[in-house]
């Protein structure tokens, strides 16, 4: 082995040791941080919210699943703790040990970094993700971003990670709702907390019912359908050109100064690259057009376009070079 190659191997080995050490040293805090949204509340109100959340969800070091979370979601305290251990090992370097996007290892500026807000970009529902949506993201990663694939994880490990993500999303969204309610009502009651928890949990309970199902199967490719898709792309009904540009490479006038829900700058995708972040299967493209991309300026078009028109657009996008 040459000295240059040996030096490179040693350097990579050192980087790996630093990486493992950095991940291992990320300690789980004793309590959840104060949310920025709650800072306008009185200290006593902040304490009341924190006490409610501790009672039903535990602390970061000792998460619990109370009766507020419906049994149908399949969450339990032991499973959530197992998921947290895996999350710390594989995900915390970017998403933070609490899943709030406060990672220290990488500056992951794209993607749903803060899971505590319950917003997920790439779903088959246009909203709350199914288990299969989350599994696909974990296994395959997100192209053009720093979200790597974790295909080496076992089915049980991925299930544990998904359950932990559900847990922190439900807890986080409930916290935000309680903060808003405290500002309006001035105090919390057990009944009010129970009602809000049910509202937060409901989308996860009924998520399979919200999967977008095309009203017709994907038509066979044809020049006619391709022409329809091209016309739609350039039309003022779909207005795809406004952000993605007339050639689909981005740079449209409507795509300037855009932000996502995480206050990141957004650049409309170059649709000619084909390596779409939300998946390149025909059905993935259908989901993105029909359901939009939650948390971003990409709108849902299923109430504007018919299933045939969405398939036509999908076929046109696949033809772009």
Image: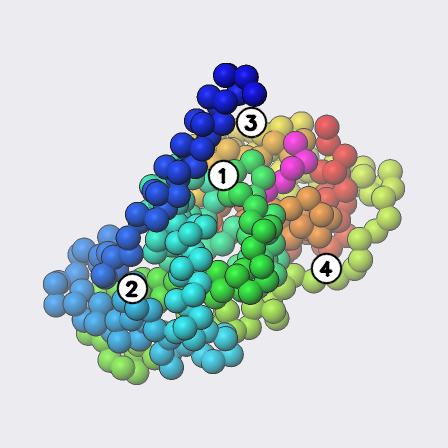
Mark 1 or mark 3: whose residue is earlier in sequence: 1
Q: Is residue 6 left or right of residue 314?
A: left
Label 1 – label 4 distance at C-alpha = 31 Å
Does the segment drawn in magenta span residue 270?
Answer: no
Q: Is residue 103 left or right of residue 50?
A: right
Label 3 – label 2 distance at C-alpha = 46 Å
Label 1 – label 3 distance at C-alpha = 23 Å
Mark 4 or mark 2: whose residue is earlier in sequence: 2
Camera-side mark, 2 or 1 = 2
Figure quadrant of the N terminus: top right
Q: Which residues are magenta?
A: 273-277
Residue at mark 2: 61
Mark 3 or mark 4: whose residue is earlier in sequence: 4
Give the crowd class for mark 1: few <14, some 14-19, many >=20 residues within 10 Å: some
Mark 1 or mark 4: whose residue is earlier in sequence: 1
Between 113 and 13, the one lying in front of the other is 13
Q: Label for residue 214?
A: 4
Residue at mark 3: 251
Tell me which secondary structure the magenta stretch mostly adopts: loop
């Amino acid at each position: 082995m040459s000295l240059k190659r040996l030096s490179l191997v040693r350097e990579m080995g050192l980087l790996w040791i630093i990486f493992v050490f950095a991940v291992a040293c990320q300690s789980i805090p004793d309590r959840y941080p104060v949310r920025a949204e709650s800072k306008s509340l009185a200290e006593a109100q902040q304490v009341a919210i924190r006490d409610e959340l501790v009672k039903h969800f535990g602390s970061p070091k000792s998460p619990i699943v109370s009766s507020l979370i419906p049994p149908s979601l399949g969450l339990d305290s032991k499973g959530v703790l197992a998921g947290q251990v895996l999350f710390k090992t594989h995900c915390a370097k970017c998403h933070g040990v609490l899943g709030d996007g406060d990672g220290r290892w990488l500056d992951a500026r794209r993607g749903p970094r803060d899971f505590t807000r319950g917003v997920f970009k790439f779903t088959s529902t246009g909203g709350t993700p199914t288990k299969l949506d989350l599994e696909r993201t974990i296994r395959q990663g997100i192209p053009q971003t720093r979200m790597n694939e974790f295909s080496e994880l076992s089915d049980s490990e991925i299930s544990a990670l998904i359950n932990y993500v559900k847990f922190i999303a439900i807890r986080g969204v409930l916290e935000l709702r309680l903060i808003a309610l405290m500002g309006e009502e001035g105090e919390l009651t057990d009944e009010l907390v129970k009602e809000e928890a049910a509202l937060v949990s409901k989308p996860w309970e009924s998520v399979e019912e919200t999967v977008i199902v095309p009203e017709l199967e994907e038509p066979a490719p044809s020049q006619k359908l391709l022409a329809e898709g091209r016309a739609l792309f350039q039309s003022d009904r779909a207005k795809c050109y406004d952000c993605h540009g007339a050639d689909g490479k981005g740079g449209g006038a409507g795509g300037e100064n855009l932000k996502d829900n995480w206050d990141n700058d957004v650049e409309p995708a170059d649709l000619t690259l084909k390596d779409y972040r939300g998946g390149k299967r025909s059905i993935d493209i259908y989901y993105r057009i029909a359901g939009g991309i939650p948390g971003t300026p990409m709108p849902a078009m299923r109430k504007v376009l018919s299933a045939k028109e969405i398939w036509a657009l999908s076929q046109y996008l696949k033809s772009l070079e």
